[in-house]
Amino acid sequence: MGARYRVSVLDVLISDGVVVDGTGAPARRADVGIVGDRIVQIGAIDVDAVRTIDASDKVVTPGFVDVHTHFDAQVFWDGALTPSPLHGVTTAFAGNCGFTIAPLLGDANDADYLMRMLARVEGMPLQSLRQGVPWNWASTAEYLDAIDGTLGINAGFMVGHSAIRRSVMRGDANRRAARPDEIDAMCDLLRAGLEAGGVGFSSSYARTHNDADGHMVPSRYATAEELVALSRVTGEFEGTSIEFIPMNGTRFEPWAVDLIATMSAAAQRALNWNIMHVNATSLDDNYQKLAASDVARERGGRVVALTIPMVVPTIISFRSGFLLDAMPGWSDAMLLPPDEKLRVLQDRDARARLRDGAADPANPMHLHAHWDQHVILDVVAPENEQYRGLRVGEIASDDGRDPFDVLCDIAVADELNTSFGYAQRREDDADWAARLEIWRDGRAVIGASDAGAHVDLLASFNYPTMLLGEAVRDRGLLPIEEAVHLITDVPARLYGLRDRGRLAEGAFADVVVLDAATVASDALRTRFDLPGDAGRLFAGAHGIEHVLVNGRAIVRDGELTGERSGTLVRSGLHTETPALDD
């Protein structure tokens, strides 16, 4: 970055904007000149341009970088990777949590297994995976080649542990520990994927990650030795990273701290873990988890937490069972086919066992087990319309019944299609102050959207517009220069992106023009636009007026253009290895 260019005609001139360059430096009024895919000049520009964007009274920023998505399948039916670009995202990293769809080197059932696993653990509609993804590759290299040139935004893809393990061990992948020769074979597959441009290694030990057959996903059967061996392979390649979920729960157990520190140190690569929720009452627990970064630093590694800058409403249903299946004694029931699960929830004795499991003090999902506090969000059966929008505790009090029985009865009448969750409240200043404290801690990075996954459960793909609208403008919690730095340069440096994350002469022209006075997310709604007519939660944005990816407009006047100018980010070629003390 920082090179000077002399040009006679610009392809794009963004004129008279307030430039917030991503470094955290004070905003300044300037023009931005673009030729091809690069920014060639920032300042007072007196050169003709093929196209001029009038940015008067607007803010001009780098494109936002989302480091945790699951766009691996969506890329085949929606190369724009919506709705992320509508919220200013120009670069995303996918293939997280070990859940990639390459390689496919086992028997013919591998693709079926992976798509059912994704449907179960990442909430992707099975009919969309079957109809919208070709499943016609074997290697990670072939998968990456299949999507190269189809992207609306820049995207990099990890190499996922569960897919590697399945390719090597087939049906034994989620039955037992691997033998030394099998670990060697996994290492070879990972090498091949990283050599092809995979941007790192991802895995998960999360208790919520169970496959469609009722087993833990393959990565959960790995020993620490296997994880460390794969981490070492990651360190053989330039510009790679590690993403891992060590455990669920409010605090890390000692083994989890030791494991992630050891993985990072073995690879000599940054490891990020997902996800840290923050409010005023969680700070002690947050700092206990962040202390893992200190252990990693002492061993010569780097560990960072991913956090999200707002409360994300969680939409739960007994049909999907996600989150609920991590409660003690719940996994067997939640993994049953819908008709069998329906019979379980009709059985009073079975309900009592589930109620007792949820009340277990060791329940890692205890925050979701306050049944009386849940609100009925959506219903199907006509007799349930009366409950829409009501709190379960209110219904139970009026009827003189137990809240859990009330919730089960409503869900049974809806054939398990009832959705419920906690009413979203406007958080107080103490919660936001706690959040800001974590954002400013060098051991945490904003960016855990899960975009492309849990399409009917949660929606945090809109975190950039929520941050800029709620935290910056409405609450005045931090200056816009700092907020932009946290969602551009910081995540770009974490993944070692070359020439992205900042507005600078010589940098790639990933640029957002926004109206700071109006920027905000639209309201969530269900949109039925996935293959097989499946639905997903969707929201566009206000105030994100123009989004350029590599100098070409993917969003113009707040609307998608149909442009596909994104780069397939390949390790080493488009990324470099950042210093571990960054």
Image: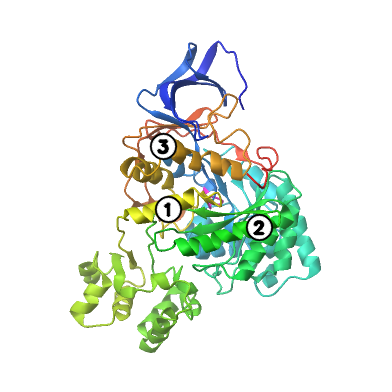
- Label 3 to label 1, Cα distance in Å? 16 Å
Q: Amino acid at mark 3?
A: Ile
Q: Amino acid at mark 1?
A: Arg
Do callouts 2 and 1 mark residues in contact (Cβ within 8 Å)? no
Residue assigned mark 1: 435
Q: Is residue 301 above or below residue 11?
A: below
x then y, percent, for residue 166? 67, 64
Magenta region, residue range? 69-74
**Total of numbered circles in the picture?**
3
Residue visible at 41% across and 57% down?
Answer: 458
Q: Quadrant of the N terminus?
A: top right
Neighbour tally class for label 3: few under 14, some 14-19, many 20 plus, Cα within 10 Å: many
- Which is the main secondary structure of the residues drawn in magenta? loop
Secondary structure beneath label 1: helix
Residue assigned mark 3: 480
Q: Is residue 336 above or below residue 305?
A: below
Residue assigned mark 2: 296
